[in-house]
Image (cartoon, rainbow, N blue to C red):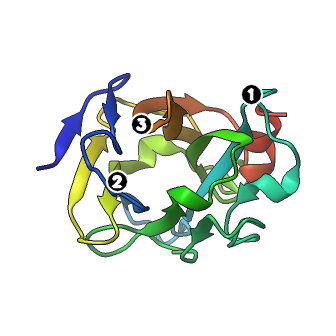
Amino acid sequence: MSVNLQKGQKVDLTKKNAGLKTLIVGLGWDEAPRKFSLFSPRADIDCDASVLLITESTEKLAGPADVVYYGNLTHQSGAVRHCGDNLTGKGDGDDEQIIVELGKVPEKYSKLVFVVTIYQAKERKQQFGMIKNAFIRIVNADNGEELCKYNLSENYDGKTAMIFGEVYRYKGEWKFGAVGEPTDDNGIGEMAARFQ
């Protein structure tokens, strides 16, 4: 049975789900209704999901290869795979998915941080106030069971990126934490710089 989380809440993933091997991390969003104008057409909002692999020893990224996103779909360890870029967010369900094979995550990584940035947000004058129904959910890839979901419900006007949540190791088990922290970063490069 899926757990609906609030900002700041944490949930055990492996302790309550013995034998859990592979996660599907689904991220989704919809574009908020907009006024149409022939004189100021607006491009579709292209949100990009990414994951940052954080080392236990430094609590930072070890390097650019530890960012999995539309330009680097598979981590060098094979433990984290991005399923591809959705350019519009149209349609129901997950807009982008990231697969995590827990047993393959090298011991040096203690945390996987899941973020969403808006492609060329500042150049296109786009921000998270133009997005609705944003969520992150964790699914057991072996049986399709949704383990938990976090719906972002606050107003994020003016913010161009978001730290959605994190999967992390704690005393030999894997947990998920709902973060929901907005930022002003313009793209994955600026977001990754926060963790260097």
Numbered circles on residues, count: 3
Residue labelled with disc 3: 175
The mark nearer the N terminus, 3 or 2, is: 2
Q: Amino acid at mark 3?
A: Lys
In this picture, residue 148 sits left or right of residue 129:
left
The residue positioned farthest toward the top in the image shown: 8
Residue found farthest to the left: 1
Q: Residue at x 66, y 57 (%)?
A: 124
Label located before the other in sequence (1 or 3): 1
Position of 72 relative to 66 (above/below): below
Residue in the foreground of this view, choosing between 156 and 105 = 105
- The vertical placement of 128 against 67, above or below, is above
- Using residue 78 as the reference point, say whether residue 171 is left or right of it: left
Per the image, label 3 sits on a secondary structure element best described as strand
Mark 1: amino acid: Glu
Residue 155 appears in the rendering: yes
Residue at screen point 54% across, 65% down: 42
The crowding category of the residue bearing disc 3, from other C-alpha atoms within 10 Å (few below 14, some 14 to 19, many at least 20), is some
What residue is disc 1 on? Answer: 59
Q: Secondary structure at mark 1?
A: loop
Q: Distance between the Cα atoms at labels 2 and 1? A: 23 Å
**Front-most of residues 70 and 187:** 70
- Name the spot of residue 72 as percent of width and height, x first: 75, 70
Separation of residues labelled 3 and 2 (CA atoms) = 11 Å
Q: Give the number of the mark in front: 3 or 2.
A: 3
